[in-house]
C-alpha cells in the first residue's frame, strides 16, 4: 500500500516539476494540492516524508510569487468542513495554505468566501481558531455589509443554525476591541495584580503587559502569537476594530431573530468600543448602542457578563499558580465607569453577592479610582440600598455602612474640592437609604445620627443639602420609637434634637423639627417645644414643618370605614407643658446671660449668633432684644416664638378642658379678643379654669414662703402672659396683643377670685391703655372693666376707688392738650367697659355705688367723640356706648334727663340725650364709608336697643333701609343680623353669650316682646323678599341665617321654621353665589332644628323643588314674582342651581334625600366662613357633627363624591371637592377601601344619559386607575375597556377627550400588568385572558377609528412586553393583526391605487411603497414579537387560521404580511413549522399567482423558506406545478413567477433543491432561453446558482430535458416552440455529440415544426435543426439516418425561399452552415445556385424602397450578404461539380468585390465566400481542372479593387487575407507559373504594398517576397 502511495506521490511530484510556467503550476496546484495534503493521514512515515518534501517544493516555488493562486474551495473543504477529513494534523497543514490562498484572492472573492471561513469555527482546535480569526479580521477591514432587500437576505452566515460560531466569533472580536498595545513594564516596576513576586518560569507575555480586560492567553490570541503586524500599529489596529464594528452593527449579519445571548455579546463589543481611545472606534460603538435593543438588565447572563467584564477573572484575589495566563484583568477605568451606568439600572445586579460589594468598594477605594468612579460607586450603593432584597441586604449592610462611613470620614471637610462634593453627598444619601432598609443597625448605634446632625451644620454648603436629604430619609429608621428605644436612647435622641434646634444652619433646624414631628407622638412635650422654637423660623420650610407638629389632631374626623378602630388621641398635659416652657425659659436666660458675660463686659452690646440684651439689674428680668441682629427676645425666646408659645398654650388649655373642641376655630379674633363661639366649649373651659384655679390656690396656700410665686398651672401661665405684656426694652406690639388677649380670656372665663387677684394691679393694667396697638388697649380696657368692678357692694373703699378711676379717665378724656389719641381712645374704652360691667354686675344697685351724674358725665363725654372726624375716636365711642348701654336701660336716670338734654344738644329741647346718641349713630351708619366704623355703629345701635327696647323700632327701620342699599359689603349684613338677633331675642340669643364675660354673674333679667320678632319676620317675608332686589335678598338671607343660628330656641323662630325653609329653598336659585351659599347653610340649620316629622316635610319640599321645579308651600303669595322666569329647573350647563341639584342628586342616589342638608353644610367654599364673621356661626362645629352623622353612609357616598369632584361644571366640582375634603381625611386609604364601589359607580356613569356624568366618570377613572394593583383591577378590566371605548366614540367632544385620557391610562396599566417582569405568570395570564380577547374581538373591529387605534396601540405594546404570556392568544393576535394590515391601511393608499395615472405614479411603484410600509408597520413588529413564543401547540391552532388567511386574505398588506410572517417563522421556528410545511407549500402554490407582482414576489420568498422544511415529494410536486405555470401560460407576468419562485427556493432551500434537480434543472435550462429578458435573467440566476454554468449538468439531465422539449415542441404556442428550439440549439452547441442519442427523437419534432407558414420566432427551429445536425455528424454516418440529411437540406432550402426577409436570412445562414458541415457528402449547390445567385446579384426593387419600413433596405442587404456568403458555404468538395460550376461562381464572387456594385459589408461576405470557394477547390490530379486562369485573374482583379478601397480598412485587410489564402491554395500548382496569372498577382500585391496601413503594406511585401522566393 505504501509503495502505491509513494508511486502516486512521485507522479504528482513529477507533475509539479514539469510545470514550467506559473500558470502551469497554478493549474497543477488546483488539482493536486488538496489530495497531497490528505496523504498526511497515511499511517506510513515514508509517505508522510514524501508529502513533506513535495510541500517543501511547493513552498519554495509558491511563497515568493504572490500571483500564483492556490485552490481556495478544496482548501476550505479540507479545513472548514468534516466531509473531506477529520484529521487535525492535516487541517493544521491545510490552514497554512488556506491563509496563503486567502491572501492571494481579490477583495470581492475574500468577502464572498467569508461565510465558509466562519462556519464551524467554534468546534475547531485553538490554533486553527486563531489562524482563521486573523484571516477573518483582515477581510473585515474591507468588508462593508449591504442592506437587506428582503428577509431572505438576513443572516447570510446562517448564525441561526450555528449560534456557537457567532458566540465564539463575537467573544474573539471583544478581545480585539479590548486590546491596546502596552509597553512591557520595566524591571523596577511592581508586579501586576495576580502575579506573585518571584514567581518562577515567566511566560512569554507578561501579565503586566496585558491590556485591561484581557488575559495573557487572550493577548497571544489577538496578536497571533506576536505575528499580527497590525497589533503593534495603532492606525492599523483602528482599521481592524472599525471592520469589526461594521460587521457587528449590521442587522443583516446579526438579525434580531438571533438568540439574546448573541446580541449580548454584540452589546459587550459595542460597549467596549465606546470606551476606546480612538474617536472613530468610539463613534462606531456609540452609534451601534443607540441602534440596538438594550439587553434585559434583569437577565442573569447579562448581569454576570457585565460583572465579569468589570472585575476580570479573579475579583479581589490573586491568580493561582498556573492560572496567570488565563486570568483576565479588570476592564479599563472608562469601561468600568460605563458598565456601572448599566448596573445602576438592574435590580438583579443589586442582589448579586459578592460582586455588588466588590464593585462598589472598587469604585470607592480602588487604586485607579477617580471622582467620576466614586460618584458612580455611590449611585450603585444607593441602588443596592433601594433595590436589594432584604434577605440579601441585611448580611452585607454593616459592611456597606462601614465602607460609606469610612469614605465620609477620610476626607477633610475644610479642604474638600468641589468635584469631591458630589460623591461625599452621595455617600450621605446612600447611608440614609441603607437606614431605611436595615434600620436595626442604626438603632443600635445612635452615633451615626449624631454625626449626621453635626455634619448638616459643619459640611460645605453643597454637601449640606445631601446631608439634609439623608437625615430626612433616615427618619423612617427611627420611627415607632416607643417600640424599640430604651429610655437612654430616647434621651439621646431628644438631646440631639434640642441641641440642633438652635443651630445657625437652617438644615439642622429643619431636620430637628422633622424628627420631632415624625418620631414622637403629639403628647410628647419636648417635641412640641422644639416645634414651637421653630415656629417662627426665618426659613419657610422649617416653619411649615413646625406648623405640622403644632397642629392638634382632630378627634371628630369621620372613620373611613365602619370597622375602623378608634385611635386614642393623646395631647400634652397643660400643667406639664406650661411648667416645661417656664423651666426652659429659665435655662435659656441663664445660658444667654453666661454668653453675655463671657463675650463682653458691656451692658447692652453683645455680638454672637445668639446675641441678646440683658438687664443686669435682675437675673429674673426677661431678655428683651439683640441690638446687633435686630431680633427681640423674651425670657430667652424670640418674640415671634413667644407669641406662638402663648397661642399654643391657650389652645392646649382649651383642648385639655374639652378634648372634642376644634382648634381651628379657636384662632379667630375680634378686636384682639380670643372668642369661643361654641357655648358648650365655653362652659367646659370655664369649669376647667375654675378647677385649675382652685387647685392652684390650694397649692399656693400649702407652699412654704421660700417657694416660687408661681407653681400652679394657671399661675405659671399667667406669669408667662405677663412677661409677654412687659413694657421694658423694645416693645413688640403683636406679642402684647396676643398676651393681652390671653389674659382677657382667663379673666373673663375664670372665677371672680381670679380677677380679684389683679385688684391691686389696676395701675399696671392702666399702663396698657396708651399702647399703640388698638387690640391691646381694647383687651386691657376690658380686663380693667372686669377687675375694677369686682366686690364693690360691701366695700366703700373700693367704691371710692372705682369713682376715682372713672373721674381719672374722664379727666384724661377731657384734657386734649397733651394726650395722644391712643391715650384718649384707651380712656374712652375704659369708661365704657367700667360702666358696662357696673351695670352688669350690679343691675339694681349700681347707682348707689357710683354717682349717676358721674355716669352721665362719662356717657356724655363718650358721645362727644361721635362727632369726631377721626374714625378711631368714632369707633372707640361706638364701642364704649355698646358696652355702657347693653346691660341696663339708661332711662333709670330719668331724674337727670333735663341735665342730659342741655349737655348733648342745646337746640334739642324735649328730646333726651340718649335719643340724640341714637340719631347720631344712625347718621354715622348711613353716611360713613368706613366699613369698620359702620359695623361698630350698627352693633352699638343693636346693643342700645337691647338695653332700652324703646329704640328698637327706630333701629330696625334703619336696618330695613340698609337691606336694599348695601350690596357689596356682605359682612355688614352679618353685623346687622347679629344686632337684629339681640334686639329680637335679647339675652336668649346665642350671639350675646360672648358678652356674658363674668363667669359667676348670671345674665341680665331682661325680656323682649315676641312682637318684635314677629315684626322682623313679617317684614322679611312680606316686604323685603318680594321686592326682587338682589341686595335685599342677600341681606334677608343673611339675617334669616343669623336668626336661625342664634335664636333657634325662640318660640316664634321655631314656629316659622317651615316658612324660613321655603325662603331659603327659593334663595338657593338666586344668581348671586354668596346668596346661594348662605341659603344652603341656612337650610341645613333649619333641618337640624326640626323634629322628625318636620324633617320629612322639609326633605319632600326640597326634593320637589329641585327635581320638579315646584315652589315650596310655605311661600308668599303665588302671584308674586319673586325670581326671574326659568331660574329654577335649568339644565346643568353652569346655571346657578346646578350645584345644589347635584348635591340633591348625590343624596337621592343614596336613597337618603335628607342627607342633602348635611351636604349643604359641607359644601362651603366662600372665604366668609373662614372669616371672623363666619366663625361666629360655629359652622366648624356643625361640620364636625355632619361628618359624624355621615359616617354610616360613606360606603354609598364616597363613590359618588369621588365622581362629582371631576364634574365639568366648576361650581359643582368645587362644592363636591369641599365635601370630599371635609369628609375624607385620608383620601388614599379611603379610595383603597372603597375602590370596588367607586369603580362600579364610574363604569355605570360612563354609560349614563347625561354627558356631564359620562365626562366626569371618564376623568375620575383616569385619576383613579393611576398606580392600582392588578388584584384591584382584574375584575373590572374588560368592563373598563368596554366602557372607555364606548365613551371614546361619544357624540360629545369633551367626553371623547376625557375618554382619550382614560384609555391612555388604561393602556399603560394594561401593558404593565401584561409584563412578566411586573407580575407573576399566573396574574399576568389572568389579565391577558381578560383583555386580549376583548381588544381583538371588539376593539380592533370597532366602527370608531379612535377605538381601533387605541386597541391596536395597546395590543402592540402588550406584544412587546408580554413574552410567554402571549402563547394562548398568539393565534388570534396574528390573525387579527394580519387582517388589520389592510383594514387599517391609510385610505390614501387605496385611493392612489385607482388613480395612479393621475398622480404620475406607476402601479409597481405604488405597490412597492405599500409593501415597504407593511414591512415597517408596527403591526408587523407586534406579529414578529409573537414568533418567539410560538410552540407546537400554538402552531396547531395557528395553522388553519393562517392558511385561510393566505387563501382568502384581502388586501396587499395582509398578503405581504402573511408571506413575511411565514418567512420569519421558518427562520426562527423551523422545527415547529416543519410538520406543517407541506400544507403551507400547497396553499402557497395558488397564492403565487396573485394579480399583484409585489404579492407574488412576497409569496415566492415565503415559498423559498418553506421549501427547506418540506418533503422532497411535496417539493417535486410543487416544481411540477411551477412547470405548468411557466409552460402553459402565455401571460408574461404569470410566467415570471415560476422563475422567481424557483430562484427563491434556490437561495433558501438549496440543499432540498439539489435532491430534485431532475425536476428543476431541465425547466431552468429551458427558461434560460425565454424571449423576455427579465424572465430569462431570473432563470439564468437559477442556473448559475445551482450549476455554476457547468456543461456537465446539461449532459447529466439531458434525458429529462429532451423529454421536456419534445413535449413543448408539440405545443400549439409558437413562442413555446421557438423557446424550445432555441434550447435545443443551445444544447447542441454546448454538448455537441452528446445529443446524438436523442437525434432520432428530436429531428422529427424540429422538421414537423418547420412545416407550414412562417411565424414570429420560427427561425429558432431552423437554428436548432442546423445546429443539432452539425453537432451530431456521427448520427448521419449510419446508413439508416443518411437519408435524413437530404430531408434536412430540402427543408432548409425550402425555408430559405420564404418571403420574410428576416426569416429568409436566418434560414440562408443555417443552410450554409449545414451545407458547409456536410460539403464532402452532400451536394446541393446545383439546386440552390440559381436561387442564391439571384439574391447575390440582385438589386432592390425601387417600389420596395419607397415603403415606410425603414428596416427594409438594410434587411435586403443583409439577405444579399447572407446569400453571397452561403454560396461559398454550399460549394461542394466534389470535383465534378467544381469543374462544372467553378467558373461561374468564381466570376460572380469576383464581380461582387467591386465597390461600385456592393456596400462594404456585402463585399466582406463576398470575401468570406471566396475564401470558402478557394479552400474547397480540388486541385488533385496532374492538372488543375477546377479553376481556370481567366477565373483566377478575375479574382485577382476583384481583390485588387478591394485592396484599392480607401474608405474601409476592413475591406482592404480582408482582401489581403483572402489574397494570401488564394496564393497559398495555388502555390505549387501550374497556375502560379502562368505569366498572366503571375503578372496579375504581382500587380495586385503592388497595390497592397502602397497601403498607408503598415500592417497591410508589410504583409504585402512579405507575400511578394514569398512568391519571388518560391519562383
Image (tube, grey):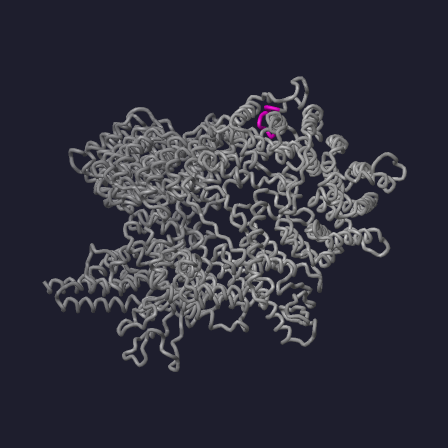
Circle count = 0
- Examine the image and state in which quarter residue 632 appears: bottom right
424, above or below 569, in the image: below
Q: x%, y% of residue 1699?
A: 37, 26
Quarter the N terminus occupies: bottom left
Asked if the magenta segment contains residue 1360, the reply would be: no
168, above or below 1715, in the image: below
Between 1157 and 1814, the one nearer to me in the picture = 1157
Q: Residue furthest bottom?
A: 188
Quarter the C terminus occupies: bottom left
Tell me which secondary structure the magenta stretch mostly adopts: loop
Horizontal side of 1081 relative to 1308 (left or right) equals right
Horizontal side of 415 relative to 1642 (left or right) equals right
Residue at 42% x, 56% y is: 345
Between 1852 and 682, the one nearer to me in the picture = 682
Q: x%, y% of residue 516?
A: 51, 59
Q: Is residue 1579 visible?
A: no
Residue range highlighted in magenta: 1128-1135
Q: x%, y% of residue 1528?
A: 30, 28
Between 816 and 1826, the one nearer to me in the picture = 816
Between 1127 and 21, the one nearer to me in the picture = 1127
Asked if the magenta segment contains residue 1133, the reply would be: yes
Q: Is residue 811 visible?
A: yes
Q: Residue furthest right?
A: 907
Horizontal side of 138 relative to 1671 (left or right) equals right
Q: Residue furthest left?
A: 1
Q: x%, y% of residue 1335?
A: 39, 34
Amino acid at each position: 500500500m505504501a509503495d502505491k502511495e509513494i508511486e502516486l506521490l512521485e507522479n504528482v511530484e513529477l507533475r509539479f516539476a514539469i510545470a514550467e510556467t506559473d500558470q502551469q503550476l497554478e493549474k497543477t496546484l488546483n488539482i493536486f494540492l488538496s489530495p497531497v495534503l490528505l496523504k498526511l493521514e497515511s499511517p506510513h512515515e515514508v509517505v508522510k516524508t514524501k508529502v513533506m518534501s513535495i510541500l517543501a517544493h511547493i513552498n519554495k516555488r509558491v511563497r515568493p510569487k504572490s500571483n500564483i493562486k492556490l485552490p481556495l474551495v478544496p482548501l476550505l473543504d479540507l479545513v472548514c468542513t468534516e466531509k473531506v477529513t477529520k484529521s487535525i494534523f492535516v487541517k493544521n497543514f491545510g490552514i497554512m495554505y488556506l491563509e496563503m490562498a486567502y491572501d492571494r484572492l481579490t477583495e470581492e472573492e475574500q468577502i464572498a468566501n467569508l461565510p465558509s471561513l466562519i462556519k464551524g469555527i467554534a468546534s475547531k482546535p485553538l490554533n486553527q481558531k486563531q489562524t482563521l480569526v486573523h484571516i477573518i479580521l483582515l477581510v473585515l477591514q474591507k468588508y462593508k455589509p449591504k442592506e437587506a432587500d428582503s428577509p431572505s437576505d438576513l443572516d447570510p452566515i446562517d448564525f441561526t443554525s450555528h449560534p456557537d460560531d457567532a458566540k465564539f466569533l463575537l467573544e474573539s472580536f471583544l478581545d480585539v476591541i479590548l486590546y491596546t498595545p502596552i509597553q512591557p513594564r520595566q524591571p523596577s516596576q511592581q508586579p501586576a495584580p495576580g502575579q506573585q513576586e518571584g514567581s518562577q518560569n515567566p511566560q512569554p507575555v507578561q501579565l503586566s503587559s496585558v491590556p485591561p480586560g484581557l488575559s495573557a492567553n487572550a493577548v497571544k490570541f489577538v496578536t497571533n502569537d506576536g505575528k499580527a503586524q497590525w497589533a503593534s500599529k495603532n492606525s492599523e489596529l483602528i482599521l481592524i476594530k472599525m471592520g469589526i464594528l461594521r460587521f457587528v452593527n449590521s442587522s443583516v449579519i446579526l438579525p434580531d431573530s438571533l438568540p439574546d445571548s448573541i446580541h449580548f455579546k454584540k452589546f459587550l463589543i459595542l460597549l467596549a468600543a465606546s470606551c476606546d481611545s480612538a474617536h472613530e472606534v468610539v463613534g462606531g460603538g456609540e452609534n451601534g448602542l443607540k441602534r440596538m435593543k438594550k439587553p434585559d438588565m434583569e437577565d442573569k447572563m447579562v448581569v454576570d457578563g457585565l460583572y465579569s467584564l468589570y472585575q476580570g477573572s479573579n475579583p479581589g484575589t490573586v491568580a493561582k499558580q498556573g492560572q496567570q495566563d488565563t486570568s483576565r484583568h479588570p476592564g479599563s477605568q472608562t469601561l468600568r465607569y460605563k458598565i456601572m451606568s448599566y448596573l445602576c439600572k438592574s435590580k438583579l445586579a443589586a442582589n448579586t453577592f459578592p460582586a455588588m460589594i466588590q464593585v462598589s468598594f472598587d469604585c470607592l477605594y480602588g487604586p485607579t479610582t477617580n471622582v467620576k468612579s466614586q460618584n458612580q460607586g455611590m449611585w450603585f450603593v444607593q441602588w443596592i440600598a433601594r433595590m436589594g432584597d432584604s434577605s440579601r441586604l441585611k448580611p452585607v449592610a454593616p459592611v456597606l455602612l462601614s465602607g460609606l462611613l469610612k469614605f465620609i470620614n477620610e476626607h477633610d471637610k475644610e479642604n474638600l474640592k468641589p468635584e469631591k462634593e458630589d460623591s461625599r453627598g452621595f455617600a450621605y444619601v446612600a447611608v440614609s437609604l441603607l437606614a431605611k432598609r436595615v434600620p436595626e443597625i442604626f438603632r443600635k448605634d445612635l452615633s451615626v445620627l449624631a454625626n449626621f446632625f453635626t455634619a448638616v451644620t459643619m459640611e460645605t454648603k453643597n454637601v449640606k443639602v445631601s446631608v439634609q436629604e439623608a437625615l430626612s430619609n433616615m427618619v423612617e429608621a427611627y420611627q415607632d420609637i416607643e417600640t424599640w428605644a430604651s429610655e437612654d436612647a430616647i434621651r439621646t435622641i431628644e438631646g440631639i434634637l434640642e441641641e440642633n434646634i438652635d443651630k445657625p444652619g437652617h438644615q439642622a433646624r429643619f431636620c430637628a423639627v422633622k424628627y420631632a414631628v415624625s418620631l414622637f407622638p403629639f403628647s410628647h412635650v419636648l417635641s412640641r417645644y422644639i416645634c414651637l422654637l421653630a415656629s417662627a423660623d426665618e426659613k419657610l420650610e422649617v416653619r411649615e414643618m413646625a406648623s405640622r407638629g403644632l397642629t392638634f389632631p382632630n378627634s371628630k374626623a369621620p372613620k373611613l370605614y365602619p370597622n375602623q378602630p378608634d385611635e386614642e388621641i393623646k395631647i400634652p398635659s397643660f400643667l406639664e407643658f406650661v411648667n416645661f416652657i417656664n423651666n426652659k425659659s429659665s435655662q435659656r436666660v441663664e445660658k444667654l446671660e453666661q454668653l453675655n458675660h463671657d463675650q463682653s463686659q458691656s451692658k447692652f452690646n453683645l455680638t454672637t449668633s445668639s446675641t441678646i440684651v440683658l438687664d443686669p439689674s435682675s437675673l429674673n428680668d426677661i431678655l428683651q432684644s439683640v441690638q446687633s441682629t435686630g431680633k427681640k427676645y423674651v425670657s430667652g425666646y424670640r418674640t415671634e416664638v413667644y407669641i406662638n408659645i402663648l397661642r399654643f398654650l391657650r389652645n392646649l388649655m382649651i383642648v385639655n378642658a374639652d378634648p372634642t373642641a376644634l382648634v381651628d376655630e379657636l384662632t379667630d379674633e375680634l378686636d384682639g379678643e380670643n372668642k369661643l363661639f361654641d357655648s358648650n366649649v365655653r362652659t367646659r373651659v370655664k369649669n376647667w379654669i375654675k378647677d385649675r384655679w382652685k387647685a392652684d390656690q390650694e397649692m399656693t396656700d400649702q407652699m412654704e414662703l421660700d417657694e416660687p410665686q408661681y407653681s400652679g398651672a394657671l399661675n405659671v401661665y399667667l406669669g408667662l402672659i405677663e412677661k409677654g405684656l412687659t413694657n421694658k426694652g423694645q416693645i413688640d406690639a403683636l406679642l402684647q396683643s396676643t398676651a393681652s388677649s390671653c389674659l382677657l380670656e382667663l379673666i373673663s372665663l375664670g372665677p371672680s377670685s381670679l380677677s380679684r387677684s389683679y385688684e391691686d394691679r389696676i395701675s399696671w393694667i392702666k399702663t396698657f391703655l396708651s399702647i399703640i396697638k388698638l387690640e391691646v388697649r381694647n383687651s386691657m380696657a376690658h380686663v380693667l372693666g372686669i377687675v375694677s368692678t369686682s366686690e364693690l357692694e360691701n366695700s366703700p373703699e373700693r367704691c371710692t376707688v372705682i369713682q376715682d378711676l372713672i373721674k381719672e379717665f374722664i379727666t384724661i378724656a377731657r384734657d386734649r392738650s397733651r394726650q395722644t389719641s391712643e391715650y384718649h381712645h384707651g380712656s374712652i374704652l375704659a369708661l365704657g367697659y367700667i360702666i358696662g360691667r357696673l351695670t352688669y354686675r350690679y343691675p339694681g344697685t349700681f347707682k348707689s355705688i357710683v354717682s349717676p351724674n358721674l355716669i352721665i358725665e362719662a356717657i356724655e363725654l363718650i358721645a362727644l367723640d361721635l362727632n369726631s372726624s377721626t374714625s378711631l375716636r368714632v369707633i372707640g365711642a361706638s364701642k364704649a356706648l355698646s358696652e355702657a348701654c347693653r346691660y341696663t336701660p339708661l332711662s333709670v336716670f330719668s331724674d337727670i334727663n333735663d341735665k342730659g338734654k342741655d349737655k348733648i344738644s342745646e337746640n334739642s329741647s324735649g328730646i333726651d340725650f340718649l335719643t340724640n346718641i341714637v340719631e347720631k349713630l344712625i347718621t354715622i351708619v348711613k353716611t360713613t364709608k368706613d366699613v369698620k366704623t359702620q359695623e361698630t355703629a350698627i352693633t352699638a345701635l343693636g346693643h342700645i336697643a337691647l338695653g332700652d327696647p324703646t329704640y328698637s323700632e327706630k333701629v330696625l327701620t334703619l336696618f330695613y333701609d340698609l337691606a336694599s342699599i348695601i350690596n357689596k359689603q356682605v359682612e355688614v349684613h352679618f353685623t346687622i343680623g347679629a344686632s337684629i338677633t339681640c334686639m329680637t331675642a335679647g339675652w336668649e340669643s346665642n350671639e350675646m353669650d360672648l358678652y356674658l364675660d363674668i363667669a359667676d354673674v348670671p345674665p341680665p333679667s331682661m325680656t323682649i316682646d315676641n312682637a318684635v320678632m314677629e315684626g322682623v319676620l313679617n317684614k322679611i317675608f312680606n316686604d323685603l323678599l318680594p321686592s326682587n332686589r338682589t341686595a335685599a335678598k342677600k341681606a334677608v338671607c343673611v339675617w334669616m341665617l343669623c336668626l336661625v343660628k342664634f335664636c333657634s330656641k325662640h318660640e316664634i323662630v321655631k314656629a316659622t321654621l317651615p316658612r324660613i325653609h321655603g325662603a331659603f329653598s327659593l334663595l338657593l336659585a338666586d344668581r348671586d353665589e354668596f346668596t346661594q351659599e348662605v341659603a344652603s347653610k341656612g337650610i341645613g340649620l333649619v333641618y337640624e332644628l326640626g323634629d322628625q316629622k318636620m324633617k320629612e316635610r322639609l326633605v319632600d319640599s326640597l326634593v320637589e323643588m329641585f327635581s320638579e321645579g315646584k315652589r315650596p308651600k310655605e311661600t308668599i303669595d303665588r302671584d308674586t314674582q319673586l325670581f326671574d322666569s326659568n331660574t329654577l329647573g335649568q339644565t346643568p350647563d353652569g346655571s346657578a342651581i346646578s350645584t345644589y341639584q347635584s348635591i340633591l342628586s348625590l343624596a337621592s342616589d343614596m336613597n337618603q334625600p335628607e342627607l342633602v342638608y348635611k351636604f349643604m353644610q359641607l359644601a362651603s367654599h366662600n372665604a366668609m366662613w373662614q372669616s371672623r364673621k363666619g366663625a361666629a356661626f360655629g359652622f366648624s362645629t356643625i361640620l364636625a357633627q355632619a361628618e359624624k352623622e355621615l359616617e354610616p353612609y360613606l360606603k354609598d357616598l364616597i363613590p359618588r363624591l369621588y365622581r362629582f369632584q371631576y364634574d365639568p361644571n366648576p361650581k359643582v366640582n368645587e362644592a363636591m371637592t369641599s365635601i370630599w375634603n371635609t369628609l375624607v381625611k385620608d383620601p388614599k386609604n379611603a379610595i383603597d377601601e372603597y375602590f370596588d364601589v367607586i369603580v362600579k359607580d364610574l363604569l355605570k356613569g360612563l354609560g349614563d344619559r347625561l354627558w356631564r356624568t359620562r365626562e366626569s366618570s371618564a376623568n375620575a377613572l383616569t385619576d383613579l386607575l393611576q398606580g392600582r394593583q392588578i388584584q384591584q383591577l382584574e375584575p373590572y378590566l374588560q368592563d373598563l375597556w368596554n366602557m372607555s371605548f364606548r365613551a371614546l366614540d361619544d357624540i360629545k367632544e369633551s367626553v371623547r377627550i376625557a375618554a382619550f385620557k382614560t384609555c391612555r391610562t388604561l393602556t399603560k396599566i394594561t401593558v404593565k400588568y401584561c409584563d412578566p417582569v411586573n407580575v407573576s405568570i399566573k396574574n399576568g395570564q389572568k389579565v391577558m385572558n381578560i383583555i386580549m380577547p376583548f381588544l381583538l374581538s371588539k376593539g380592533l373591529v370597532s366602527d370608531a377609528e379612535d377605538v381601533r387605534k387605541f386597541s391596536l396601540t395597546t395590543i402592540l405594546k402588550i406584544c412587546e412586553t408580554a413574552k410567554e404570556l402571549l402563547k394562548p392568544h398568539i393565534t388570534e393576535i396574528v390573525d387579527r393583526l394580519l387582517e388589520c394590515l389592510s383594514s387599517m391601511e391609510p385610505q390614501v393608499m387605496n385611493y392612489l391605487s385607482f388613480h395612479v395615472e393621475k398622480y404620475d405614479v406607476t402601479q409597481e411603484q405604488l405597490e412597492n411603497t405599500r409593501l415597504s410600509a407593511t414591512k415597517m408597520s408596527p403591526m408587523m413588529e407586534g406579529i414578529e414579537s409573537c414568533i418567539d413564543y410560538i410552540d407546537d401547540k400554538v402552531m396547531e391552532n395557528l395553522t388553519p387560521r393562517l392558511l385561510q388567511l393566505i387563501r382568502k386574505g384581502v388586501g396587499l398588506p395582509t398578503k405581504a404580511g402573511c408571506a413575511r410572517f411565514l418567512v420569519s417563522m421558518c427562520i426562527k421556528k423551523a422545527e415547529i413549522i416543519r410538520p406543517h410545511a407541506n400544507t403551507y407549500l400547497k396553499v402557497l402554490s395558488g397564492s403565487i399567482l396573485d394579480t399583484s407582482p409585489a404579492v407574488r414576489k412576497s409569496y415566492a420568498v415565503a415559498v423559498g423558506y418553506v421549501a427547506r422544511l418540506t418533503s422532497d415529494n411535496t417539493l417535486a410536486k410543487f416544481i411540477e406545478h411551477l412547470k405548468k405555470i411557466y409552460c402553459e401560460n402565455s401571460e408574461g407576468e404569470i410566467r415570471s413567477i415560476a422563475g422567481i419562485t424557483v430562484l427563491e427556493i434556490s437561495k433558501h432551500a438549496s440543499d432540498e433543491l439539489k435532491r430534485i434537480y431532475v425536476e428543476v434543472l431541465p425547466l431552468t435550462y429551458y427558461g434560460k432561453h425565454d424571449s423576455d429578458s427579465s424572465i430569462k435573467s431570473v432563470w439564468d440566476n437559477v442556473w448559475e446558482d445551482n450549476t455554476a454554468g457547468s456543461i456537465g449538468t446539461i449532459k447529466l439531465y439531458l434525458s429529462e430535458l429532451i423529454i421536456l422539449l419534445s413535449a413543448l415542441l408539440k405545443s400549439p404556442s409558437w413562442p413555446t416552440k421557438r423557446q424550445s428550439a432555441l434550447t435545443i440549439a443551445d444544447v447542441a452547441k454546448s454538448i455537441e455529440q452528446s445529443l446524438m442519442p436523442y437525434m432520432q427523437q428530436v429531428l422529427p419534432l424540429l422538421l414537423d415544426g418547420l412545416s407550414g407558414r412562417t411565424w414570429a420566432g420560427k427561425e429558432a427551429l431552423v437554428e436548432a435543426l442546423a445546429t443539432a445536425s452539425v453537432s451530431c455528424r456521427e448520427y448521419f454516418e449510419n446508413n439508416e439516418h443518411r437519408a435524413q440529411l437530404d430531408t434536412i437540406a430540402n427543408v432548409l432550402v425550402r425555408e430559405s425561399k420564404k418571403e420574410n426577409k428576416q426569416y429568409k436570412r436566418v434560414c440562408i445562414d443555417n443552410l450554409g452552415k449545414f451545407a458547409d458541415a456536410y460539403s464532402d457528402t452532400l451536394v446541393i449547390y446545383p439546386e440552390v445556385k440559381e436561387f442564391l445567385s439571384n439574391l447575390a446579384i440582385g438589386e432592390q426593387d425601387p417600389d420596395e424602397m419607397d415603403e415606410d419600413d425603414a428596416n427594409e433596405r438594410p434587411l435586403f442587404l443583409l439577405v444579399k450578404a447572407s446569400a453571397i456568403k452561403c454560396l461559398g458555404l454550399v460549394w461542394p468538395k466534389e470535383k465534378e461539380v467544381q469543374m462544372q460550376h467553378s467558373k461561374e461562381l468564381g466570376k460572380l464572387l469576383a464581380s461582387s468585390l467591386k465597390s461600385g456594385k456592393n456596400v462594404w459589408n456585402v463585399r466582406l461576405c463576398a470575401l468570406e465566400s471566396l475564401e470558402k470557394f478557394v479552400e474547397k477547390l480540388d486541385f488533385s490530379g496532374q492538372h488543375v481542372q477546377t479553376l481556370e486562369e481567366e477565373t483566377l485573374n478575375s479574382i485577382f482583379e476583384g481583390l485588387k479593387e478591394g485592396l484599392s478601397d480607401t474608405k474601409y480598412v476592413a475591406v482592404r485587410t480582408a482582401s489581403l487575407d483572402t489574397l494570401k489564402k488564394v496564393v497559398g491554395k495555388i502555390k505549387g500548382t501550374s497556375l502560379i507559373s502562368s505569366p498572366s496569372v503571375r503578372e496579375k498577382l504581382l500587380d495586385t500585391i503592388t497595390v497592397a504594398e502602397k497601403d498607408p496601413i503598415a500592417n497591410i503594406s508589410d504583409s504585402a511585401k512579405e507575400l511578394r517576397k514569398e512568391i519571388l522566393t518560391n519562383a
